[in-house]
Image: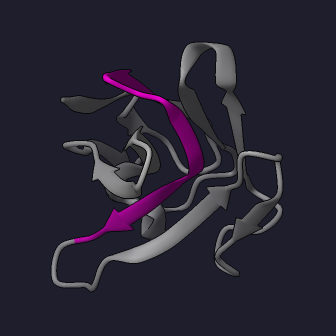
Amino acid sequence: QVQLVESGGGLVQPGGSLRLSCAASGSIFSIYTMGWYRQAPGKQRELVATISSGGTTNYANSVKGRFTISRDNAKNTTYLQMNSLKPEDTAVYSCNADIRVQLPIIQRYWGQGTQVTVSS
């Protein structure tokens, strides 16, 4: 069984920074693309950022220049560094990972989410 656990969320003032972490554990052969999504109350879930196993990154236009996704393959962990935070960044942030547990198939796993609140 595979589990993803996020940490690092909390309350921060506009213009501040937070660093989210997501660690994968369990019966893992390989981890491919990892990513972060977010969902605010009354809004649809949206992609924030992804990072491939080779380090290629993609970002939503709304966070480009402010957020940075990274990963530590030795720790099976992805990070989301969030700078210059705005109130509209307030949401539940969830990580995901495409993971090979057995040879023939890759499955996408999700964490439970962590709350980020940007308010003065």
**Left or right: residue 43 compared with residue 54:** left
Name the one closer to the observer, 50 or 16. 50
- Against 67, is 6 above or below? above
Based on the picture, tell me whether residue 96 belongs to the magenta stretch.
no
Based on the picture, tell me whether residue 28 belongs to the magenta stretch.
yes
Principal SS element in the magenta part? strand
Q: Quadrant of the N terminus?
A: top left
Q: Quadrant of residue 12?
A: top left
- Against 65, is 81 above or below? above
Picture coordinates of residue 14, whole percent (x, y): 55, 50
Can residue 113 be seen in this snapshot? yes
Picture coordinates of residue 49, whole percent (x, y): 61, 62
Q: Which residue is at a point 25% across and 45% down the rendered structure image?
A: 113
**Left or right: residue 109 compared with residue 112:** right
Name the one closer to the observer, 30 or 45. 30
Q: Quadrant of residue 104?
A: bottom left
Can residue 93 be seen in this snapshot? no
Q: Which residue is at a point 35% across and 57% down the rendered structure image?
A: 108
Write down the region rendered in magenta. 23-40
- Against 19, is 60 above or below? below
